[in-house]
Image (cartoon, grey):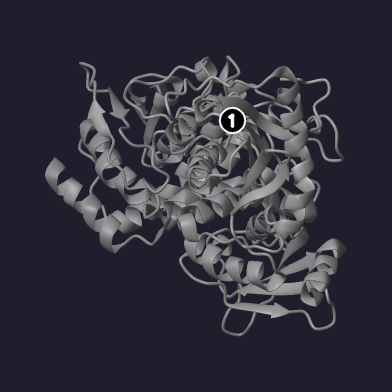
Amino acid sequence: MAGSSTSYYFVIIGTKDNPLYEAEFGTFKQGGDGVPKFREEQRHMNQFIAHSSLDCIEDLQWASKEMYLKAVDKFNNTWVSCFLTGGNIKLLLVHDARSDEPIRQFFTDVYDMYCKTLMNPFYEVNMAIRSQIFKAAAKKYL
Amino acid sequence: MNRETSPFRTPSTGASPTPKHASLTASTNLRYSLTRKSIYDRHLNRTKTSELSKSAFAFLFGEMVQHAQKKVYGVQDLEKKLNQHGYAVGQRFLELLLWRDGRTAKRETRILGILQFISHSLYRAIFQKAADTLEKVRENEDEYMISDNDPLVNAYVSVPKEMSQLNCGAFIAGIIEAVLDGHCFPAKVTAHTAPSELWPGRTVFLIKFEPDVLEREALRVGG
Amino acid sequence: MSSASRARLGEEVWKTRTDKINAELVTLTYGSVVAQLCKDLDGDYAEVNKQLDKMGYNIGLRLIEDFLAKSNMQQKCANFRDTADVISKVGFKMFLNITPTIANWNSDGKQFSLLFDENPLADFVELPDDGKAQAELWYSNMLCGVIRGALEMVQMQVDAHFVSDLLRGHDTTEMKITLVRYIDDELPQDDE
């Protein structure tokens, strides 16, 4: 798959396996326009791939003390990378090529914004986040 | 996105419901001041070393207790309310502290690890001192104790007579509970007055883990 | 006492006579109080404002003693302008480590504004986007009550309320304080 057609599915999962935020991005690298280019069936698959990785994560999270668990699951040519916060919120990215470092940077920015969201006394853990703030992080690193 | 067939749980399912009101954080309906940076543009370390007066906290905390007391049915109910306030504070400090550790941040995966995190790092960040002791309760496999000789929250608060059994440490118990819960070590944490000759306000936080936590720990020790 | 020496006094009290604590603990605790009130009162923000003011008032009644002891202020303020100066440079400095700007005096010298460039209570805060909070909630309203209660203990009945707030998207955070009257040898009214 050519680099510029790379697309990402990003989801934040709450402590009760509830999605707090979902988005699709296209790559911004190599002249990419940031628009996701998933085919319809793939869009649906992304959610299932992300969801089915939750079991893997549950095993891995007790074997490692890292917050960034890197790629935790693979389905055909699709990877799932995971960052686990202190409050057990899972940041998941479904992507078609391994690239641990840019994804780490993306997750780091997202975590920063998640913390800022949480510090607001009117936000409660597991509330959906409707903000567009995470798009900027995708643009920077993906 | 395909909502009907989404494999994720929708917020309406599950035993304990997720909060009703979805956040609209940073959506376009809010008005923003031209002179104030949005919460997303402010660095999270801006307040890292900021200090306020202890009495400001004492007055606020004391009034919080007074206010909560008006609508409760006794000491336990009041302690539950203080616990809830502490819980909200603890959830936030947990993520904030890990965020501040950056790339070196570690999640604790063992009971002793998370208890040490609480009695050292967390306690120091919030109260500028480590907790005084961390012990295992000998008789009960699932219980631990963290003690504080002179908890900040008991220092200034005058407890009304009819509430003489109240320990305002319930607030700190809530902070501890939030951190344990957040890290998937669900436990019940309660504050108990345990005065010593030297420390009349000494408080013990009793931590009782849920059975799952011990089962998991046993598995990990084996593997 | 000159305005400059009050500023020095405030600094000195803050530096040498004030036990300090992590500001984030205070900010988050205040946030929890406000958020809980909003929930308990089911989004009736007018009532939340009222409760915050009342809690502040109770604090003010007790806080004045701590203030007088630490600041060691013996003399009464000569006039309301002096009072304003003391509130900003000694009072706010001592408790919240800020000195709000005094502005907008009216012609009879009985009303002024405090402008808050910084407000530690509101760090991290964004009001709920429910179409109401930004029009109705005064997030830091407890501060009004504190001033009202504290001044009442030194024989001044005042009205204090916010007229703008950065959290509402305004360009300033401004509290207006108006002297209603000096109380002569009366017992303070019980607000409860």
Parent chain of label 1: A
> Which residue sits at x=81%, y=76%?
B222
Residue A140 appearing in the image: yes
> Which residue sits at x=55%, y=52%?
B93
In this view, the residue in front, A11 or B77, is A11
Q: Mark 1 is on which residue type?
A: Met
Judged left or right of residue C181, residue A72 is right
Q: Position of residue A118 (x, y in %)?
A: 57, 40
In this view, the residue in front, A22 or A31, is A31
Asked which quadrant contains residue C17, the reply is bottom left
Q: Position of residue B168 (x, y in %)?
A: 65, 59
Judged left or right of residue B28, residue C162 is left
Mark 1 Cα-neighbour bin, 10 Å: few <14, some 14–19, many ≥20? few
Q: To which residue does mark 1 refer? A: A1
Judged left or right of residue B70, residue C87 is left
Judged left or right of residue C75, residue C40 is right
